[in-house]
Amino acid sequence: MVQTSKNTSGKRTARRNRSALRLPVAVLLISLTLVGGRSLLSPGQGAEAPMLPEPVPAVTQTPSPTPVPTPFPVPTSLPAQETHPSAPYDYTVPVPASGPAEASWFSDAAFLGDSLTDGLLLYSGIRGADNLAYKGLTVQSIRTDKVIKTDSGKVTPLEALGTKTYGKVYLLLGVNELGWYNDQRFYKAYGELLDLVRDAQPDAQIYLQTLLPVTAEKSASHAYLTNDKVETYNALIAELAAEKEVYLVDLHAAFAGDDGALCPEESTDGVHLTKSAYQRWLEVLRTHTVSE
């Protein structure tokens, strides 16, 4: 029994000695391995150091330039087919106000009418225009009454119109026709007269003026010389201007007050004008012209 215990104790001692011996050996092997690995990686110990890749320089991004649109070439002149003609004149509306024309504007003008137009040529200060007006004339008698004096005798205003070339022809007729029983007779006769004027002066500007109002007193005291009748005839005159394609000057609008009547201070008898009113009439004509 004692012998067995000794043997057992010896075996345990031998195992402990072997375990103690294995630990240093393991440490030694690990150390050798580390030293050997370092020698394999260290340059100058017979092993060539691995080549490291050269660093790639950083690339600076240059921003792309903003594209500039190429302008379209501008032609020095428009092709003929791209030009636009002027719009046709609207004869259905009166001539609009404009800057005053020069005094010489009327140097190639003829004026046809009755005593109202005669007063304009006598008292307004107009210069250079030919006076083919006479008291009492109508759209009919202006073609038949020989009242215009010439070197060869008296002729009708329409005949006198054809003796020379004019640049403008102004007409104001209708006051003496207000008593006609048939308004369409006036319309038809005035239309025929405009055709004859066009035939006599094919290249002239033709200005058709609306009738002036009369004073309220005259309108109230007369059977047919009334402002209601004046407005009726002015509507027909506006229709004629559009139909015959002549320029309409709305003289009535320039002289009618809020009541549609002529101011008493601007008239000598309720129909005809004072000198200052004739001068204002001339200014209306100067500021209502058409440039062609």
Image: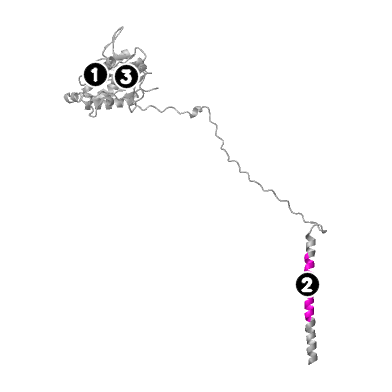
179 relative to 18, above or below:
above
Which residue lies under the disc numbered 1?
274
Q: Quadrant of residue 216 in the image?
A: top left
Q: Which residue is under mark 2?
A: 26
| Foreground tag (2 vs 1) | 2
Percent position of residue 156, x then y: 28, 13
Image mark count: 3
Determine whether 134 is above or below 34 in the image.
above
Crowdedness of circle 2 by 10 Å Cα count: few (<14), some, many (20+)?
A: few
| Front residue of 239 and 48 | 48
Residue that badge 3 annotates: 170
Q: Mark 3: which amino acid?
A: Tyr
Q: Position of residue 114 (x, y in %)?
A: 26, 17
Q: Depth check: give the residue in front, 165 or 106.
A: 106
Residue type, numbered disc 1: Thr
Q: Residue at x 36, y 16 (%)?
A: 104
Which quadrant holds residue 257? Answer: top left
Q: What stretch is highlighted in magenta?
A: 15-34
